[in-house]
Amino acid sequence: MSATTPSAATAPAEIARSRTPSADPSASTAKLYRRVARRETHSPRSTTAIVLAILVLLFLLYGGTEIVLNMLKLRALVASPTQVADAIGNVTNDDSGTVLAVGIAAAVIGVVFVLIGLTGARRARHLLPDDRSVVVVDNEVIASAVARHASLAGEVDPDNTLVTVTHRRAQVRLTPASGHPVDRAAVVAAAERELATANYQPAIAASVQINTAGKVGA
């Protein structure tokens, strides 16, 4: 969990149960909470901005170098400004398929950069509802809590219970002991109850997979 939450040793669902409703926060406080929540659940775009800045800088350095070489009547590294201008002027005379392909590629690259700029990468975290603070829980903590309840419901050793939590789903994988049947419905109910009690934001759905090949001595 983040620094704004209690110890990770406490199950998120138990934290949710222990919280009492409070008065609705003011508009300014709610706005602040939303900003903090987004900052804690999304990665910053600094890496993307640095990469783009480096690419732009390299392009400008290359363009400046070509201009200087052209002014000194020296051989161009790739293409002189005059050659580039002639190539652009002759675009309409080239094969239409090539022009279309280049245009589509440029459009796709532009859309990708726009999406990166608007969204940002999502961190492996979820929010717990709270009016007085921003409570952030790592997906690993959620997975640990779900695994504990799933292993108890299925009577499977915790070491043979694997839970993977993504943005919208908790995938539970159980490997029971050979000859030991597992009540899948009970496992699903236990996992969903844990997730529903915590009331994560965004909501997480549970899915259960039981390995048909049991493990000897599990």
Image (cartoon, grey):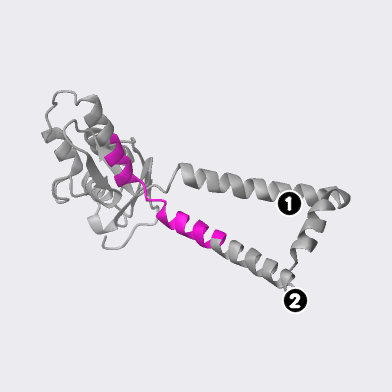
Where residue 103 sits: x, y (%)?
72, 47
Q: Which residue is mark 2?
A: 74
Residue 139: assigned label? none
Where residue 105 sits: x, y (%)?
68, 50
Which residue shows up at 17% across the image and 50% down it? 8
Residue at the extreme bottom of the image, as rendered:
74
Left or right: 74, with 145 as reference point: right
Graded by Cα atoms within 10 Å as few (under 14), some (14 to 19) or many (20 or more), the crowding at tag 2 reads: few
Q: Which residue is mark 1?
A: 102
Secondary element at image label 2: loop
Left or right: 67, with 211 as reference point: right
- Residue 189 visible, this orientation: no
Nearest the eye: 126 or 64: 64
- Residue 70 visible, this orientation: yes
Secondary element at image label 1: helix
Nearest the eye: 109 or 173: 109
Which residue shows up at 41% across the image and 54% down it? 46
As drawn, 128 above or below 120? above
Q: Which residues are magenta?
A: 34-56
Q: CA distance from mark 1 to mark 2?
A: 30 Å
Q: Nearer the viewer, mark 1 or mark 2?
A: 2
Between discs 1 and 2, the one toward the N terminus: 2
Label 1–label 2 contact, CB within 8 A: no
Nearest the eye: 182 or 42: 42
